[in-house]
Structure formats: structure tokens, C-alpha cells
Amino acid sequence: MAIDATQPYDDSNIFAKILRGEIPSTKVYDDEWAYAFEDINPQADIHTLVIPKGQYVSWDDFSARASDAEIGGFIRAVGTVARAKGLVEPGYRLLANIGQNGGQEVPHLHVHIFGGHHLGPMLVK
Ligand code: AMP
């Protein structure tokens, strides 16, 4: 079920538990600002999630409240992960779902990285 992107941060969400090491994940990348891991239900041959270390519900929350250092570190981490996966030359897609209409299910900001093949049309209505 999609979340309300204006809700306060709830640190019992599944990605907060992954960050705390309370539930397992397949680590792809880890630094001061971001953690990346494989999506448990991949929608493409490559489907990796990148999350900020800070407590932000959504892209909206992050872009409004995060420091320039957090934002810079997170954006750089997304690019680093895509490069490490060899996705730049063939191309790839980034996606951040926000709130109800976006279909966001986990209330901790995450950017999806999709790649590995031609990804088809951007949206299916
Ligand atoms: P969204 O709809 O943008 O909130 O996407 C949530 C994503 O998190 C989905 O692609 C899920 O497959 C993924 N997901 C949920 N639980 C886990 C988990 N424990 N480990 C990895 N990915 C997960």
C-alpha cells in the first residue's frame, strides 16, 4: 500500500532496519551518505536501490530538509553505483516514487536504478 509522503519519519520502516543491520540485504555500496542494495523483487535485470543514511521519508522530505552535504553525497553515490554496475555506456533509468500517486511503499527515500537491457516506455498508464 502506498504511503503518505507528508507523514513523519517512522524508524520502524524496513529500510531503516536494513541500515541498522537488523534485517539482511545484498550490499552493493556503502559510504558516509548512502547505502545501496539489490531490490528483493527485481523489475529489471539490474534493479538496485540507493538510500540516504539520514532519516528522510521521501524525495520531497530530503530535498526540503537535508543539508547540501547530504544531498551531494547521496547524488554522488547514485552515480557511483550506476558506474560500478557498468550502466553508463548502455544507459539506465532512475526512479523515485513519492507518496500515493507515485506508488511509494517504503517510507524511507530510495532511488531505484534499473538497467541491463532496453527498459521500454517510461510509463504505463
Ligand atoms: P517503492 O514502491 O518505490 O516504495 O519501492 C519499494 C521497493 O522496495 C520495491 O521495489 C520492493 O521490491 C523493495 N523492497 C521491499 N523490501 C525489501 C527488502 N527487504 N530488501 C530489498 N528490497 C526491498
Image (spheres, rainbow, N blue to C red):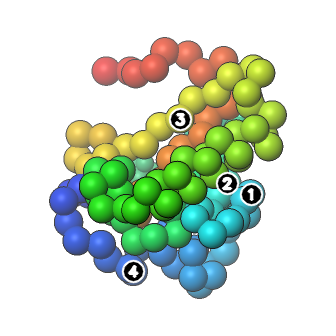
Q: Amino acid at mark 4?
A: Ser
Q: Which amino acid is tagged 2?
A: Glu
The residue at the point 61 percent across, 35 percent down is 114
**Which class describes the residues within 10 Å of circle 1: few (<14), some (14-19), or many (20+)?**
some
Among the two numbered marks 1 and 2 on one chain, the one whose residue lies closer to the N terminus? 1
Which mark sits nearer the N-terminus, 4 or 1? 4
Q: Nearer the viewer, residue 99 or 56?
A: 56
Mark 3 beta carbon near ligand 1 (under 8 Å):
no
Is the residue at mark 4 in contact range of ligand 1, meaning its CB lies under 8 Å from it? no
- Which residue position holds label 1? 28
Measure how far apart labels 1 and 3 are at the Cα level: 16 Å
Cβ atoms at labels 2 and 3 below 8 Å apart: no
Instruction: Examine the rendered structure and indicate whether residue 87 appears above or below residue 3.
Output: above
Counting from the top left corner in percent of width and height, residue 40 is at 62, 56
Mark whose residue sits in front, 3 or 4: 3
**Marks 3 and 4, Cα distance to the nearest angstrom?**
26 Å
- Give the labeled residue for mark 4: 12
Residue underneath mark 3:
94
